[in-house]
Every structure is written in structure tokens, then in C-alpha cells.
Image (cartoon, rainbow, N blue to C red):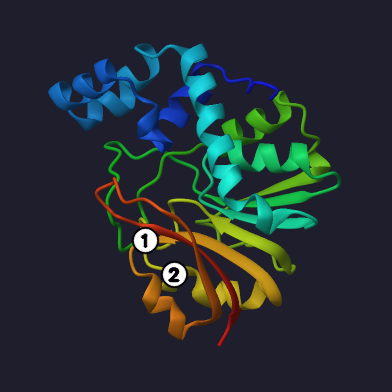
């Protein structure tokens, strides 16, 4: 598998988005000095960029494997809260002529928190860095488009697959995007996201399949693949 090309800024964002990339030393630093200093300083200057790049690739390959059978033969993808775009890059590399639209926030919170956020105000991304990541990893601009979630200028075309890994209904309520998703999903479109309440969605979708279970995490979440709003 071709490695990811990350600079220090991208490695920092990847770490803030996927805290499992932190080694024991960094986790201890965060605990001692707090979230603010960790988010602003230590997550950038105390990291091994090459190691973060390698670990991030490994994590994204595992994520791809959980959804791979749902994306084969598909063309138009929407990613909500995908971070710097590692999973999306792998999809673009593996599926010829595919296209990914991103809905992302464009700022990093002063104290990055990883819990539930009813207002969906917590963020740890930079759209310029997302664009740079895709370009520096040889993805042409014709194959992706980035939308700022706070500007409400979302894409309006229909998508084959929509995914939101550890974002939608994991950090903020599904209802924030439900009306929008109804507009951009076809009957056969597949929606993939992580939630602690899969049974709740049995009343919302025609079909639900649990494709991954995180039993060793605090959230005990399940990744579900859904089709057909009722």
C-alpha cells in the first residue's frame, strides 16, 4: 500500500482527529498538562511525523476494510466529518473515476474534546490542509469537492454511498443532518455511520445492518449500514 504523505501540520490534525494515534508518552502529556496545551502545542511539536503517518495509514486501511463491500462499483461518495481524508483518499485510489464530496468544519477547538456535542460545535480540522493532503497524495481536484459545514452550501446531487465515521450520531445528533440526507439519498443509497443506538434507526430506515462493533471502547458503538428512509 502506497504510504500517506503527511507534513507536521497534517500529522497534528490526524492525531487530534484520531487520538488512538497517540503513543503512551503523548497520552501522559495530555493528562498532565491538559487539553488546551496538548491541542495547541504538544500535539504538534512532540510528535513523530513519520510514525503518525504510518499509524494513520494502518487505521484507515482497517476502516476501509469495514465498508469495502458497500463501496465496490460505486462512484459518487459523500463524507461527513471525515477529517483530513485518509479513508477518502484510499477510496479514490482504489475506485477509478470515483468522486468524493466532503462536508467538514474549518477550525480547531481550543480544547479538543471527544464526547457528545449537541450543537455540533466541536471541531478539529482545516480545509486548506484537507485540500493539501489530497493534492500532495496525487488526487486531482476534479475528483473531490470540499464544503464548509458552517456555511450551509451543501452539495445537492444524489450519492451512491454516504459515510460518517465516528462523527454523525457518535459526537452529535443524527437529526442535525436527517432532512439533508433525505434529499441526497436515492432509494438504493447506502448510509454508513457509528452509533450507540442502532435499534433507534430501525424506525427510520427500511434496512439496517450492523457491520462493526466496538465493544472495547467507552462508547460501545456499532457501525451500521442503512438504506431507504421510511
Give the residue at the far bottom of this rendering. 230
23 above or below 57? above
Tell me, yes or no, if residue 85 can be seen here: no
Q: Is residue 219 placed above or below 22 in the rendered structure? A: below
Residue 148 or residue 193, whichever sits in front = 193
Quadrant where the image shows the C terminus: bottom right
Left or right of residue 85, residue 169 in this image: left
SS category of the residue bearing label 1: loop
Question: Secondary structure beneath disc 2?
Answer: helix
Return the residue at label 2: 176
Front residue of this view, candidates 19 and 61? 61
Q: Are marks 2 and 1 in contact (CB under 8 Å)?
A: yes
At x 31%, y 28%, the residue is 39
Q: Quarter of the image holding residue 90? A: top right
Q: Residue at x 70, y 55 (%)?
A: 71
Q: Is residue 223 visible?
A: yes
Q: Position of residue 169 (x, y in %)?
A: 40, 63
Q: Residue furthest right?
A: 97
Q: Position of residue 102 (x, y in %)?
A: 62, 50
Judged left or right of residue 184, residue 203 is left
Task: Say which of 221 and 139 sits in front.
Answer: 221
Viewed as shown, does residue 198 lie left or right of 35?
right
Pinpoint residue 103: horizontal percent, then vertical percent.
58, 53
Which mark, residue 73? Answer: none
Residue at 65% of width from left, 35% of height from top? 131
- Residue at the disc numbered 1: 172
Mark 1 is surrounded, within 10 Å at the Cα level, by few (under 14), some (14 to 19) or many (20 or more) other residues, namely: many
Q: Is residue 49 above or below residue 153?
A: above
Give the distance between the C-alpha atoms of the residues marked 2 and 1, in whole angstroms.
Answer: 8 Å
- Sort mark 2 into few (<14), some (14-19) or many (20+) by Cα contacts within 10 Å: some
- Relative image position of residue 196 (x, y in whole percent): 33, 63
Question: In the figure, residue 22 lies in which quadrant?
Answer: top left
Amino acid at each position: 500500500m502506497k504510504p500517506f504523505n503527511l507534513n507536521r501540520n497534517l500529522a497534528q490534525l490526524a492525531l487530534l482527529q484520531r487520538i488512538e494515534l497517540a503513543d503512551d508518552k503523548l497520552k501522559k502529556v495530555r493528562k498532565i498538562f491538559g487539553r488546551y496545551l496538548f491541542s495547541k502545542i504538544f500535539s504538534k511539536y512532540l510528535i513523530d511525523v513519520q510514525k503518525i503517518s504510518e499509524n494513520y495509514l494502518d487505521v484507515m486501511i482497517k476502516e476501509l476494510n469495514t465498508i469495502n463491500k458497500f463501496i465496490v462499483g460505486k462512484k459518487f461518495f459523500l463524507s461527513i466529518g471525515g477529517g483530513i481524508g485518509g479513508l477518502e483518499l484510499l477510496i479514490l485510489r482504489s475506485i477509478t473515476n470515483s468522486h468524493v464530496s466532503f462536508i467538514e468544519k474549518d477550525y480547531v477547538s481550543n480544547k479538543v474534546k471527544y464526547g457528545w456535542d449537541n450543537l455540533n460545535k466541536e471541531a478539529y480540522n482545516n480545509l486548506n490542509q484537507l485540500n493539501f493532503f489530497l493534492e500532495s497524495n496525487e488526487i486531482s481536484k476534479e475528483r473531490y469537492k470540499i464544503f464548509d459545514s458552517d456555511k450551509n452550501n451543501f452539495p445537492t446531487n444524489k450519492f451512491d454511498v454516504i459515510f460518517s465515521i465516528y462523527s454523525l450520531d457518535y459526537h452529535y445528533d443524527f437529526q442535525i443532518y436527517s432532512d439533508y440526507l433525505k434529499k441526497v439519498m436515492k432509494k438504493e443509497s447506502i448510509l454508513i455511520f457509528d452509533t450507540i443506538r442502532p435499534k433507534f434507526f430501525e424506525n427510520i430506515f427500511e434496512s439496517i445492518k450492523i457491520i462493526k462493533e466496538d465493544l472495547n471502547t467507552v462508547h460501545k458503538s456499532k457501525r451500521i449500514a442503512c438504506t431507504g428512509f421510511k
